[in-house]
Image (cartoon, rainbow, N blue to C red):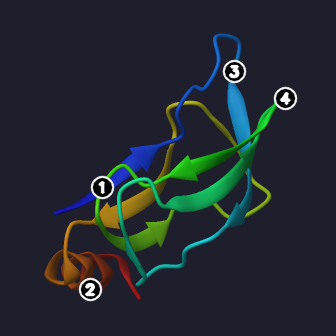
Amino acid sequence: MAEAYPLPKWGVTMEEGTIIEWTVQPGEAVVVDQVLAQVETDKISVEYVSPIDGFIAAHLVEEGTTVACGEDIVVIATDQQDYDEYRSKHGG
């Protein structure tokens, strides 16, 4: 199954973050704790890592975009079949 994952809240006062760079592109396989993106907040720059093994199905936020904590930013499919199903339903 392909599932969307949100921008986490890394600090008590953190309200938003900016996606500076995606380091993995849709279609690429990822493993747990692999860096997916560089995110900048008002206080720190941090690496957003994959919570699961799978395939990047989609970036929901473009580089340079600022999003609120809790907003979905990436879709990760658990396997190739789930990735293919997601892409056929959502274009690509």
Is 54 in front, or is 61? 54
Q: Disc 4 designates what residue?
A: 42
Q: Tell which tag, 3 or 2, sits nearer the viewer.
A: 3
Q: Tell which tag, 1 or 2, sits nearer the viewer.
A: 1
Q: Please identify the quarter of the rendering in which residue 64 is found.
A: bottom right
Mark 4 lies on a secondary structure that is loop
Q: Are marks 3 and 4 in contact (CB under 8 Å)?
A: yes
Q: Disc 1 designates what residue?
A: 52
Q: Tell which tag, 4 or 1, sits nearer the viewer.
A: 1
For marks 1 and 2, give the CA distance.
22 Å
Q: Say whether disc 3 or disc 2 marks the residue closer to the N-terminus.
A: 3
Residue furthest to the right in view is 42
Mark 1 lies on a secondary structure that is loop
Q: Disc 3 designates what residue?
A: 14
The percent position of residue 55, horizontal first and vertical second, equals 33, 74
**Quadrant where the image shows the C terminus:** bottom left
**Mark 1 is on which residue type?**
Ile
Dot 1: within a 10 Å radius of its alpha carbon, few (fewer than 14), some, or many (20 or more) residues?
Answer: some
Q: Disc 2 designates what residue?
A: 88
